[in-house]
Amino acid sequence: MTARHLFFGVSSGRTGTMMIANALNAEPEVTCLHEGKFRHLEASGDSVLPYLTLENRLAYENPAVARDLFAQQRGRLEAWPVRFGRPWFGDIAYYYAPFLGAIRDAYPDASLVVLFRHPVAFMASAAAVHGPDPAPLGWPPDGRELTPVERFVGLGRLQPRAGSPEATAWPRWSYLVRNAWLWAETNRMILDFLDSGPTPRRFVRRFEDFFADPVTSYGHLREFLGLPGQLPQPVARLFERPVNRRPRPAANVLEQLTAEERETVHGLLAPVMIRLEYPWGFP
Amino acid sequence: MGLPLILRDVFTGALGAERASAITLDSTMHDVPGWDSVTYMSVVAALEDVTGVEFTPIEALRMTSVRGILAVLSERRVVVA
């Protein structure tokens, strides 16, 4: 195995990465983890790599420590394909955005899979869960009681750095505005990295484009990774059953915003949406 | 130097005596069975109760290893023995 067989997936979350990880891991030549562990559809399997749930925020708060944190938790990944007897090895997780520079430094030949999704869909996703969230990602609705796991994940969730104008405004922001900031900041980091050079080999897609024809898109991903042979039919069939799909919220989240919040959200999202060529509004 | 008593007690409460007995100064939550996200939250909360210190989120984020916990406690001038 060479580092060229290593790959990392990154996104803001809610971009279909769980399904893609399931598909890749069903390939006979690939071990693909989701947030450091095996997934069996929505169910979590064995944990293989330490999660970076908390390190995510530490690396964001202090980028100088990102390389050390990454080296501690993701060093010597070349050993894992040998252990699993499959030449390709990857991990897809929302928490890699602050670590992209560290990934490039540690594994310059590794490949990067990047997915983006319209921000209003991201904001709506967090608004769609009313009970305990088994896969917490965005900021939860205001006032909802959280489970210990939700509080743990929330501790590592990005929020504005102390001293920034956004940090000053943060206590006044509703969870919808906070999720707009989270989407914008995560994707800004990813885009800035992609625009900097040199960057690793990358496969970049918008969620909406990938899942308009997921089997064809997945075939393109296989080609990008250099997987041999035709797409196995059992793998293709995985795309017939969505995983981790959220209920669509009853109301358009943009309509839940006050006029002031709408202006704030627009200001947060617009610069990144323009870079991604996303239209404003509810998709 | 062994594990300070205050940590031994906190980990025993969170993990049980058998698992806690395996924890050393070099242990991290990534290599101790049972030191998962729920246990992590319990350990941080128990340390706040025992020390009377309310940790900041950034301090809590660093408490994923025994040495990380000791560093935060030292910075907060909590004496451990």
Image: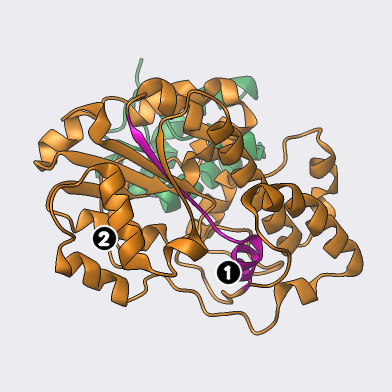
Q: Which residue is painted at 33% across and 31% down in the image?
A: A110
Q: Nearer the viewer, residue A265 or A230?
A: A230
Mark before the other along the chain sequence, 1 or 2: 2
Name the kind of residue labelled 1 in the image: Ser
| Left or right of B24 in this view: A169 | right
User: Are the numbered discs 1 and 2 placed on the same chain, yes or no?
Assistant: yes
Direction top: furthest residue: B1
Q: Colour of chain B?
A: green
Q: Nearer the viewer, residue A110 or B73?
A: A110
Secondary element under disc 1, as helix, strand or loop, is helix
Q: CA distance from mark 1 to mark 2?
A: 22 Å
Q: Position of residue A212 (x, y in %)?
A: 44, 70
Residue ID for mark 1: A125
Q: Which residue is painted at 27% across and 43% down in the image?
A: A225
The answer to whether residue B80 is above or below residue B55 is above
* Front disc: 1 or 2: 2
Chain of the residue under the numbered disc 2 shown in the image: A
Q: Colour of chain A?
A: orange
Q: Decide: marks 1, 2 in contact (CB < 8 A)?
A: no
Residues drawn in magenta: A110-127
Q: Position of residue A155 (x, y in %)?
A: 58, 47
Is residue B64 within the magenta segment? no
Return the mark for residue A23: 2
Chain of the residue under the numbered disc 1 shown in the image: A
